[in-house]
Image (cartoon, grey):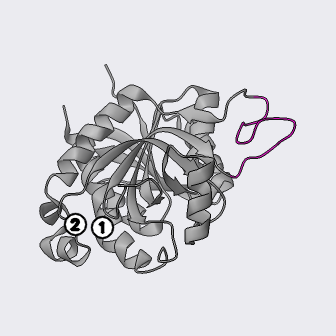
């Protein structure tokens, strides 16, 4: 029985570079203005790509992965801002479902509901998410080993946690305490906020393709959200993504 072809999506170049460094035979193919890298990871067929930032870009990327490359499952890794209490910098959030926090077609439809779908939230695949969770726990078990002692100490990562639940997506970078508080009021069960996942979840729903997403918390989506973001992506989020996927594909 052949293994599924997995699409690996990253939102930022640093994350993709860390993934490509672990693919020994990647081959580039340019589609829809993007470079798709097809190859293998521990014998598994994979296609890695940079989604770019925002929901439209993410939807284009997911559609191309399915239509042009025939992937049978998609994994999205990257960074996000923490919303819920207890979701701290250096933690990971495994998506159970996604919602577009900026979707509002009221009064025709309820706030956040996607018109003509009869729903606001799109679930991830339970089986694929469970495998990704196992790989994430392995990466989080020893931050100093996964990231290097210097990076772990620099960002104070001693006992990072894995959370599971709702992630909110929208086409703006949430970077003020006021915006973060407004999101928590509107979506009190949302754990984190980012800019792509809900779009990919909707595309995968349309095509019946299993989808899982894991985000490393880079900030608290507040007035300090811009501080050291690039360094965090370089030294923490990208390394976590590569370590999680290495454990995921290495598992029997």
Q: Which residue is mark 1?
A: 236
Point 61% across, 65% down: residue: 179
Mark 1 Cα shell of 10 Å, populated few (<14), some (14-19), many (≥20): many
Return the x and y of residue 215 as percentages of the image width and height.
41, 53
Real-space CA distance between mark 1 and mark 2, rounded to the nearest whole angstrom:
10 Å
Q: Quadrant of residue 171?
A: bottom right
Q: Which residue is mark 2?
A: 157
Q: Quadrant of residue 217?
A: bottom left
Whichever of labels 1 and 2 marks the residue nearer the N terminus, that label is 2
Return the x and y of residue 224 as percentages of the image width and height.
47, 77
Q: Nearer the viewer, residue 58 or 149?
A: 149
User: Image check: 25 left or right of 179?
Assistant: left
> Circles 1 and 2: CB distance less than 8 Å?
yes
Q: Is residue 151 magenta?
A: no
Point 36% across, 78% down: residue: 231
| Residue numbers of the magenta segment | 102-116
């Amino acid at each position: 029985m052949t293994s599924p072809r997995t699409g690996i999506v990253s939102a930022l170049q640093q994350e993709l570079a860390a993934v490509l460094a672990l693919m020994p035979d990647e081959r580039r193919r340019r589609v829809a203005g993007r470079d798709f890298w097809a190859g293998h990871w521990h014998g598994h067929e994979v296609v890695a790509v940079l989604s770019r930032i925002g929901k439209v870009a993410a939807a284009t990327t997911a559609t191309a992965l399915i239509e042009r490359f025939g992937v049978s499952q998609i994994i999205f890794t990257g960074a996000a801002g923490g919303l819920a209490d207890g979701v701290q910098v250096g933690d990971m959030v495994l998506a159970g479902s996604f919602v577009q926090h900026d979707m509002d077609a009221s009064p025709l439809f309820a706030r956040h509901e996607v018109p003509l779908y009869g729903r606001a939230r799109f679930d991830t695949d339970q089986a694929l998410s469970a495998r990704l969770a196992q790989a994430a726990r392995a990466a989080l078990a020893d931050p100093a080993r996964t990231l290097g002692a210097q990076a772990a100490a620099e960002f104070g990562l001693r006992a990072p946690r894995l959370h599971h639940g709702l992630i909110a997506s929208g086409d703006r970078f949430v970077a003020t305490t006021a915006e973060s508080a407004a999101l928590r009021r509107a979506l009190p069960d949302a754990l984190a906020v980012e800019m792509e996942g809900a779009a990919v979840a909707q595309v995968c729903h349309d095509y019946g393709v299993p989808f899982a997403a894991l985000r490393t918390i880079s900030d608290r989506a507040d007035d300090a959200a811009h501080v050291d973001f690039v360094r965090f992506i370089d030294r923490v989020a990208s390394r976590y993504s590569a370590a999680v996927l290495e454990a995921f594909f290495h598992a029997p």
